[in-house]
Amino acid sequence: MSKFELLVREMRHAYDQRDWYAPLKPALEGLSAQQASWRPEGYGVNTIWETANHLLYYKRQLLHYLKGVEMSNCSQTNNETFKVDSPHDEEAWRQTVLQIEEVQQELLNIVGTKNDEDFDTLLADGDPMGNYISSLVRHDSFHTGQIIQLRKLQGSWPSKR
């Protein structure tokens, strides 16, 4: 198995294929905008939707790096990537989930064309391509755990899976 075949495998596990941990796609499925915007009272945590926007931002950033094009809003701070404009807009929430799916599939398609010689190619931010992709997988998995924890707290995650 090549390095990039392994990365594609890990990307799939983090997004839509269950492994040792639950993937992102089912963690976002079946939620209303209200559930995605829920924040436990008294806690300074990001909502599911805020976290989804954050994940989408960094997936888009990688996609732009891989395509060699500049990202129009790359000057955002990390905190700004969590922003939600209309927290009760069902269509906006649906579009966020759809955009994550589209960007994920495009990333899988591009990463699937890479070969081991590309692994150490530097991206626009100076990180080697393989390392950046691997970090993004871990980043997605970390935040997926946060999303699932919020769903458990609100009672929208099945007790047995």
Image (tube, helix red, strand yellow):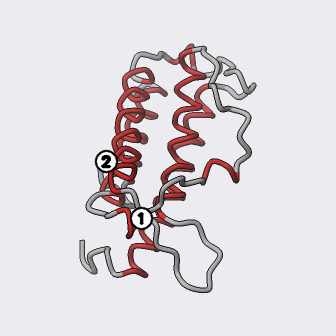
9 shown above or below 14: above
Judging from the image, what secondary structure is the residue with disc 2 in? loop
Residue 107 in the figure: left or right of residue 136: left
Judge left or right: residue 70 versus residue 94.
Answer: right
- Which numbered disc covers residue 16? 2
Q: Which residue lies furthest to the bottom in this view?
A: 42
Residue marked by disc 1: 36
Residue 17 to residue 33: above or below: above
Please provide percent x and percent y for residue 109.
37, 23
Kindly state the secondary structure of the residue where label 1 is placed. helix
Q: Which residue is drawn at 60% across and 53% down?
A: 83
**Residue 16 at x, y = what percent?**
31, 47
Q: Residue 58 is drawn in which quadrant?
A: top right
**Residue beneath the point at 63% across and 48% down:** 81
Tell me where residue 40 appears, x and y as whole percent.
52, 81
Q: What residue type is labelled 2?
A: Asp
Label 2 crowd bin: few (<14), some (14–19), many (20+), radius 10 Å: some
Residue toward you, 70 or 7? 70
Camera-side residue of 52 and 13:
52
**Nearest to N terminus: mark 1 or mark 2:** 2
113 or 77: nearer the eye? Answer: 77
